[in-house]
Image (cartoon, grey):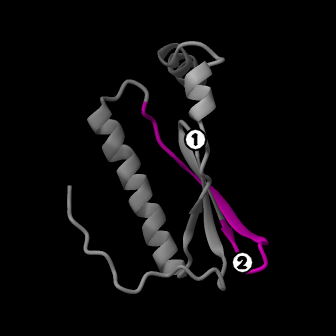
């Protein structure tokens, strides 16, 4: 791990647009939008976490996030990520066991 000094002047302005991120189990979907909200470009940063240890998963995701931050810095745009409230789903767990769900998703990804 490294310590990164926080910059005194961070870009929170959306006047040039934003870079939006959607997190999924096997990739980050990234969209670059202009100030009017029109899509400029999109891409997927794919990764594989199947069969990896928690430490390996952390490093894999960390490297992808560093790429996202670097691209946002180059474009001079803030990153926007959806905040989901999963409180209800964690309590009720309508789809069964977390481990079983993860194994099911992983099996679908590897096909």
Residue at disc 2, secondary structure = loop
> Magenta residues, as a range?
32-49
Residue under numbered circle 1: 24
| Percent x, y of residue 6 | 31, 75
Q: Nearer the viewer, residue 12 or 74?
A: 12
Q: In the displayed image of the protein, which residue is found farthest to the left?
A: 2
Asked whether, in this view, residue 51 is left or right of residue 33, the answer is: left
Question: Residue 33 lies in magenta, yes or no?
Answer: yes
Q: How many angstroms separate mark 2 from mark 1 (CA)?
A: 23 Å
Identified at 67% across, 61% down, the residue is 42
Residue at disc 1, secondary structure = loop
Q: Residues within 10 Å of mark 2 (few under 14, many from 20)?
A: some
Identified at 43% across, 27% down, the residue is 50
Q: Earlier in the sequence, mark 2 or mark 1?
A: 1
| Percent x, y of residue 17 | 66, 78
Identified at 30% across, 29% down, the residue is 53
Question: Residue 73 lies in magenta, yes or no?
Answer: no
The disc at residue 34 is 2
Asked whether, in this view, residue 79 is left or right of residue 67, the answer is: right
| Percent x, y of residue 73 | 46, 77
| Percent x, y of residue 45 | 53, 51
Q: Quarter of the image for the C terminus: give it.
A: top right
What is the number of callouts on the image? 2
The disc at residue 80 is none
**94 relative to 82, above or below:** above
């Amino acid at each position: 791990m490294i310590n990164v000094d926080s910059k005194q002047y961070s870009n929170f302005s959306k006047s040039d647009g934003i870079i939006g991120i959607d997190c999924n189990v096997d990739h980050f979907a990234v969209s670059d939008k202009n100030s009017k909200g029109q899509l400029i470009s999109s891409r997927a940063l794919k990764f594989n976490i199947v069969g990896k240890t928690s430490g390996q998963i952390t490093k894999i995701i960390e490297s992808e996030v560093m790429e996202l931050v670097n691209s946002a810095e180059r474009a001079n745009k803030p990153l926007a990520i959806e905040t989901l409230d999963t409180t209800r789903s964690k309590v009720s767990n309508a789809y069964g066991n977390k481990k079983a769900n993860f194994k099911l998703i992983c099996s679908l990804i590897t096909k």
